[in-house]
Image (spheres, rainbow, N blue to C red):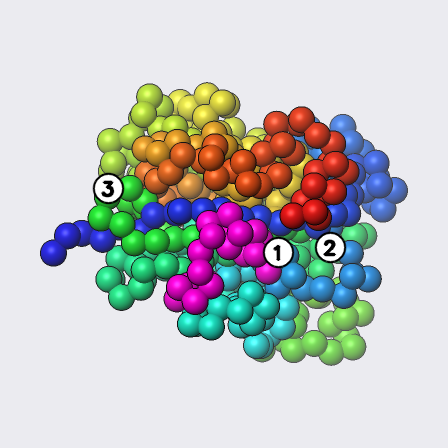
Amino acid sequence: MEKINAVITGVGGYVPDYILDNEEMSRLVDTSDEWIMERIGVKTRHILKPEQGRGVSYLMTRAVRQLMEKTGADPDSVEALICATTTADYHFPSTASVVIGNIGLRNAFGFDMESACAGFLYAMEVGANYIRSGRYKRIIVCGGEHMSSMVNYQDRNTCPIFGDGAACVMMEATTEEVGLIDGYYRVEHDYDHLHMAAGGSAKPPTHETVDAREHFVYQEGRAVFKHAVTKMSDAVETIAKRNGLTNENITWLVPHQANIRIELAVARRLGLSESQVMVNIDHMANTSGGTLPLCLWEYEPQLRKGDRLIFTAFGAGFSWGASYMIWGYDGAKEAAKSPAQFYKEGEISREEWHELREKR
Ligand code: UT7
């Protein structure tokens, strides 16, 4: 029997209209554009405002709708939908069930996967294995967050970092030697440095937990930074060595967008130049489970069949890893159907981009 691989055949994405820039951020907390740009690399972030009364399923539904339009896939042919998110609409039902209902995927099952910033990396591996098993041919993997729903806009240590957005990929069966080739994934338990203290079954919500502001992201940045650099660098090196990859034959490093300094440090370990690294943290910020697919969404026009990509992510848990993928299609043709490319290339203003997108 021929070996079955799982390959990405399309990308969709969506970010909310509202843009929170560093000038507005410095009116919320004691910070500055200079500090944020130098220490993190974020200029603006997209925010789904609370008054819109919507959860992450809204972002994912918009992303999947675009994916369906771009690929022209019959909704009845989609067999599963996996949502990597830490900001699910509800404890239950799953965000996947909301998205499946919104899009009308009548033959699909679905579920949420929570592994913070490593969520999409793991969800791709899970999705690929459904396909490799031979039992499923077409599934959608989403990654995205409504981070602003759990960010404390009184805490300058965390609030400049995060943004909202979602993107998704279609994964399909192929017998060609393309798609997700290898993965290295690890967890080393840590609670203290990165968590949300209350709201789960260990500490259900009470008046006291709300008063103590325990329903927000808590992060000890410096410690997380060190672990992120070490673990992601080790993971990409492991994957590279295992697959005979060097700075000369890797086309793209797709790193979790947590901090520009972390991304470039990981790239340096492999001797990669900055032009080989997908970066959108400046205008997307850290969308946790959304960062990797949002990178693909924006860089799709530059992707060519046969390109070699290494994905890497690190997040709460601690959870991290790296994957090796051979890209399966010419991105320029597909991306022409999506306004993300114009935004990325700076050909149009964000306002024009939003207008264009709304018209679609
Ligand atoms: O996505 C999941 C994984 N997360 C990450 O990978 C994030 C990893 N961590 C980081 O990206 C960085 O550690 C941060 C961006 C969170 C912080 O940067 P840092 O360079 O590690 O700063 P720091 O926490 O060591 O703080 C340095 C100084 C402190 O002042 P003192 O104590 O030296 O006087 C902070 O109080 O900067 C101060 N500071 C700020 N100043 C202006 C912290 N936040 C701000 C701020 N504006 N927003």
Rendered residue at 84%/41% (across/down): 24
Q: SS for tag 3?
A: loop
Q: Residue 90's x, y, as percent? A: 63, 72
C-alpha distance separating marks 3 and 2: 39 Å
Is label 3 in contact with label 1 (beta carbons under 8 Å)?
no
Query: Nearer the viewer's eye, disc 2 or disc 1?
Result: 1
Viewer-nearest residue: 9 or 209: 9
Is label 2 in contact with label 1 (beta carbons under 8 Å)?
no
Q: Residue 340's x, y, as percent? A: 60, 38
Q: SS for tag 2?
A: loop
Rendered residue at 45%/26% (across/down): 276
Residue to which mark 1 is pinned: 62
Answer with the quarter of the image where residue 337 lies: top right
Q: Residue 277's x, y, as percent? A: 48, 29
Answer with the quarter of the image where residue 127 lies: bottom left
Secondary structure mostly seen in the magenta stretch: helix
Q: Which quadrant of the rendered structure holds the N terminus?
A: bottom left
